Image: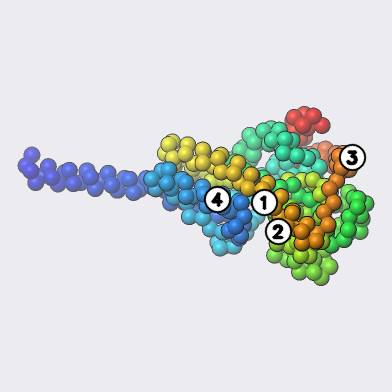
């Protein structure tokens, strides 16, 4: 073979190798329901994007889009990931698609971080299975601080909820409000301030580092009963995830596992900072005792079982496993 032919062949091999490398690189579209870049959750998503690009030398890059910057409703994020409209997402409002997850949102079921860990260990395989049915890989989740009652009126006990209209984010939270004589109202977060100002609602279930961070001026009272937790899933389109090399997929899994711990910790720290700031600004904060928690839990316990029975045998089975893990 002459020099010219050998040179041409070598050049073609090099070009082909470069093209293969370019084709192998994955450029993912990321999305989060949150429109606020300063939250612990969004900061964690940004770190995931930065770390995976650096750790894979650009073999995987994720461009993160904040909530409302893409034409995707918060309740449609699971479907958008399953359809490949986005490759990677934080999904807070997924329980309509993966309904088994609602067990972790049942009011008064989980009262502290230790109980959450026990319940989540039971639930994790069911979450993976539920998302897989949607064409989505479940990578993990981060947890918001406990949802407590922030109100326009003073609360000294749960009887004070009677006749009050409370904004909730799930039917399960609504069941809690109704159990104590209140009315549950569903509103978009953007509508909450005006609804509070006009008296359309009397309060909200949220966290100091959650909605109260933005709405505290309308909410002079905080009754810190740990009603429930909210948590967000980190998910990926299954095909996009499967197309990654084994090494890149392992790095992504490791980074996500590390960052969700940091997000959880960030929320815990911010919850305390916001709570102190809100108290300093004049918010009346009422801590509840163990007896109040136990009484509320006892009142809601029949609802857990009724809810699971209405949802079907699998839900009864899984709830039973969670209750056993919690010793309840």
Separation of residues labelled 1 and 3 (CA atoms): 27 Å
- Residue at numbered disc 3: 291
Classify 233 as above or below 314.
below
Say if residue 121 shows up in the picture. yes
- Residue at numbered disc 4: 45
Q: Quadrant of residue 191?
A: bottom right
Q: Nearer the viewer, mark 1 or mark 4?
A: 1
Q: Kindly indicate whether the residue at mark 1 contacts the one at mark 2 (C-beta within 8 angstroms).
A: yes
Q: Secondary structure at mark 3?
A: helix
**N-term-proximal mark, 1 vs 4:** 4
- Residue at numbered disc 1: 270
Separation of residues labelled 3 and 2 (CA atoms): 28 Å
- Residue at numbered disc 2: 213
Residue 68 place in picture, x, y as percent = 59, 62
**N-term-proximal mark, 3 vs 4:** 4
Classify 281 as above or below 111.
below
Q: Secondary structure at mark 2?
A: helix
Residue 27 is left or right of residue 178, and the answer is left
The structure residue drawn at horizontal position 89% and vertical position 39%, both measured from the top left corner, is 291
Q: Nearer the viewer, mark 3 or mark 4?
A: 3
The structure residue drawn at horizontal position 76% and vertical position 49%, both measured from the top left corner, is 147
The structure residue drawn at horizontal position 85% and vertical position 51%, both measured from the top left corner, is 286
Separation of residues labelled 2 and 4 (CA atoms): 20 Å
Q: Quadrant of the C terminus?
A: top right
Q: Secondary structure at mark 4?
A: helix
Q: Bin the neighbour count of mark 4 within 10 Å (Cα to Cα): few under 14, some 14-19, many 20 and up.
A: many
**Along the line of sight, the residue nearer the viewer: 114 or 170:** 114
**Along the line of sight, the residue nearer the viewer: 168 or 311:** 168
């Amino acid at each position: 073979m002459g020099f010219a032919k050998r040179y041409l062949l070598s050049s073609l091999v090099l070009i082909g190798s470069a093209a293969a490398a370019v084709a192998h690189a994955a450029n993912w579209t990321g999305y989060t329901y949150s429109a606020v870049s300063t939250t612990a959750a969004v900061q964690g998503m940004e770190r995931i994007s930065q770390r995976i690009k650096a750790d894979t030398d650009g073999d995987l890059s994720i461009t993160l889009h904040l909530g409302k910057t893409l034409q995707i409703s918060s309740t449609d994020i699971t479907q958008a990931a399953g359809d490949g409209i986005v490759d990677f997402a934080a999904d807070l409002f997924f329980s309509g698609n993966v309904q088994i997850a609602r067990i972790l949102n049942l009011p008064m079921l989980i009262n502290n971080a230790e109980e959450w860990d026990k319940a989540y260990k039971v639930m994790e395989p069911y979450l993976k299975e539920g998302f897989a049915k949607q064409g989505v890989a479940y990578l993990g989740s981060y947890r918001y601080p406990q949802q407590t009652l922030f109100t326009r009126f003073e609360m000294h006990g749960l009887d004070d909820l009677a006749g009050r209209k409370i904004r909730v984010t799930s039917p399960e939270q609504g069941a809690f409000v109704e159990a104590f004589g209140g009315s549950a109202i569903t509103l978009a977060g953007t509508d909450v301030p005006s609804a509070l100002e006009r008296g359309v609602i009397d309060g909200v279930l949220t966290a100091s580092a959650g909605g109260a961070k933005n709405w505290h001026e309308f909410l002079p009272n905080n009754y810190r009963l740990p009603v429930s937790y909210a948590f967000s899933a980190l998910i990926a389109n299954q095909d996009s995830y499967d197309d990654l090399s084994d090494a890149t997929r392992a790095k992504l899994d490791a980074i996500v596992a590390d960052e969700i711990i940091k997000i959880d910790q960030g929320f815990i720290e911010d919850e305390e900072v916001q709570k102190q700031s809100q108290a300093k600004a004049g918010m009346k904060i009422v801590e509840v005792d163990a007896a109040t928690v136990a009484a509320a839990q006892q009142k809601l316990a029949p609802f857990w079982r009724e809810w699971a029975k209405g949802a079907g045998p699998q839900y009864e089975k899984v709830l039973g496993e969670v209750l056993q893990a919690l010793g309840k």
